[in-house]
Amino acid sequence: MGEFDVIARYFRRAQDQGGVVSLAGGDDCAVLQPTPGQQWLVSTDMLVEGRHFLTTVPPEALGHKALAVNLSDLAACGATPRAFFLSLALPRVEESWLAGFARGLFALADAHGIRLAGGDTTAGPLNICITVMGEAPAGQALLRSGARVGDDVWVSGVLGDARLALELWRGRVQLSGEDFEHVRRAMEWPQPRVALGQALRGVATAALDVSDGLAGDLGHLLARSGVGACLEWAALPRSEILARQAQDLQHECLLAGGDDYELVFTAAPQARSSVEAIARALGLPVHRIGRIEAQPGLRLVDAQGQTQAVRVQSFDHFA
Amino acid sequence: MGEFDVIARYFRRAQDQGGVVSLAGGDDCAVLQPTPGQQWLVSTDMLVEGRHFLTTVPPEALGHKALAVNLSDLAACGATPRAFFLSLALPRVEESWLAGFARGLFALADAHGIRLAGGDTTAGPLNICITVMGEAPAGQALLRSGARVGDDVWVSGVLGDARLALELWRGRVQLSGEDFEHVRRAMEWPQPRVALGQALRGVATAALDVSDGLAGDLGHLLARSGVGACLEWAALPRSEILARQAQDLQHECLLAGGDDYELVFTAAPQARSSVEAIARALGLPVHRIGRIEAQPGLRLVDAQGQTQAVRVQSFDHFA
């Protein structure tokens, strides 16, 4: 099976050529028709075997996750997903792997109405690079720079389960079979909060997605907004499984976990009822975890009511 | 030196944040403002060490080529380059390599007025994935599907030198030092024909860039247009260096070479003077190499005036 067969069999679909992608497949570029009054939001993420995913990950989960982490960036900006581009370096053509990967990828793409508009396929060490494009009304995209002193800090869902799964793989913790499946699912099947991001346009003042750990990612938002924040340890949302772990492990998973793909956002206190209404409408819990302050840096009120500084550091691939 | 230092030192530039990229750097997505009346043209290419470039390539040439092959796709569609996204997997942080790579990349970017709007940096086997975005007036992008029976087939520049350089590396041919430098330059520093592509809007009926070899790439254009073509061996433009090689090697380099990044396009015979005027204005030679015919497939009139079928096959990464 050659390169063009791989594309034809697994990545070309008989689908509507209308919408924003006016033409696709077979030309040197895809042609995208902007929607009047909208701006494009564009992001790209590269996933490397052994770095971003374990060799043991089922291909269907990998296809899902490769697109999910990209959709999560669109979600963070409140964008409506439109088109994505997939570049794939494969060590070899393995049909069952490709079939599973494509199944996971397209199931999530269909769920969010985003179209595969182009890409590249080559031989090489396994590498998945996806570029996503979405739209938002001009000037209304959620950015990291809009947090204001006095804003609430919110987070969707729960944090830390994906990191707990990693610690399990590393042999640091042991979990029951059921708990293992739960945290593994959090790591392998993250759900990008696309609908939440769109609903937060005009409500949130700033937003980002937690991919490298709450403390580090929130640190970027604070720096861009020129503010600080104080979070409450007790308010950080965690699963019952994580809540049963030792405090230091909880601390690590909640603040430096990574791979959460939940949205952290800020909003004025007057917007609380709007935020809660959005959460109810989407059936997605959101939690108020702290407050934006004028003093730069990130602080945490711990279980004993003591305020401590949090070292703001994201995961660094070259550290 | 960590991931964020790499980005800050080599890939962030103090530059105008205006134009189509209204905001860039630090947010989860770049925000692009469409120009009224324009469509977006988007393409992506992934380059893998040992597959798309030799380990010996100077980093500056690699930075140039990684963007050049992508710009070539915009050129093929007649698009004006606007923004690009760079994802980079690096085995390690090597400052001299990064400095050279960035120098080559940005020199070409600046020459074509295209902005680095976002990207991703990670550890992993060396892999460069670039997504380019350009604009063209709605409905005027050059596609592969517009060739009509009776059209001339044109190609820019010369073909085959990059492939000749590869054969030299493989030890199949020997060249003088000066000739070696010439063909190595063709391989390592391809010049995307961006201005030509734009000038051909409204003149050419179909176009593509030759990246996988003339026969295979033109075959895609013929298939998409539902036509065939007959080329003339004597008319295929080649350097004096290639013209001195054995006929079978010339044949291979000209028809199945790859890495040429010249534009192949079709245009009505009435457009000949326009095409020639464009070529003169740009100081870029173009050559009429054949004719579009109703009979499917690709044929070649050889040096003896005999017409032979050409096997249409592109380079296949998994063949």
Image (cartoon, coloured by chain):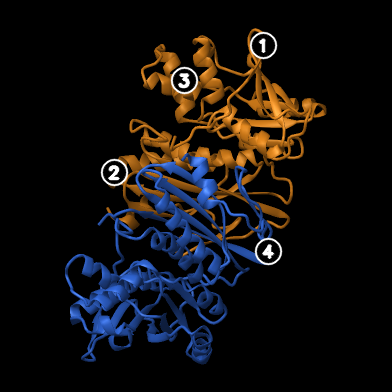
Chain colours: A orange, B blue
Q: Residues within 10 Å of mark 2 (few under 14, many from 20)?
A: few
Q: In the image, are marks 4 and 2 on the same chain?
A: no
Query: Label 4 to label 2, Cα distance in Å?
Result: 43 Å
**Label 4 packing within 10 angstroms: few (<14), some (14-19), many (20+):** some
How far from the left and from the top, in percent, is residue A260?
53, 28
Q: Tell me the element at label 4.
A: loop
Residue at which label 1 appears: A306
> Chain under label 4?
B
Q: Amino acid at mark 1?
A: Gln
Which residue: 76% across, 39% down? Answer: A202
State the residue position of label 4.
B35
Q: Residue furthest front?
A: B96
Does the CB distance between marks 4 and 3 fall below 8 Å?
no
Label 4, label 1: how many angstroms apart (C-alpha)?
53 Å
Q: Of label 3 and label 1, which has the lower sequence position?
A: 3
* Residue marked by disc 2: A94
Which residue in the protein does label 3 denote? A164
Residue lying at the far top in this picture: please name it: A304
Q: Are marks 4 and 2 in contact (CB under 8 Å)?
A: no
Q: Are marks 4 and 1 on the same chain?
A: no
Q: CA distance from mark 2 to mark 3?
A: 31 Å
Residue A40 coordinates in the image, percent (x, y): 64, 52
Q: How far is the residue under mark 2 from the one under mark 1? A: 55 Å
For mark 2, name the chain: A
Give the side of residue A2 with respect to residue B117, left or right: left
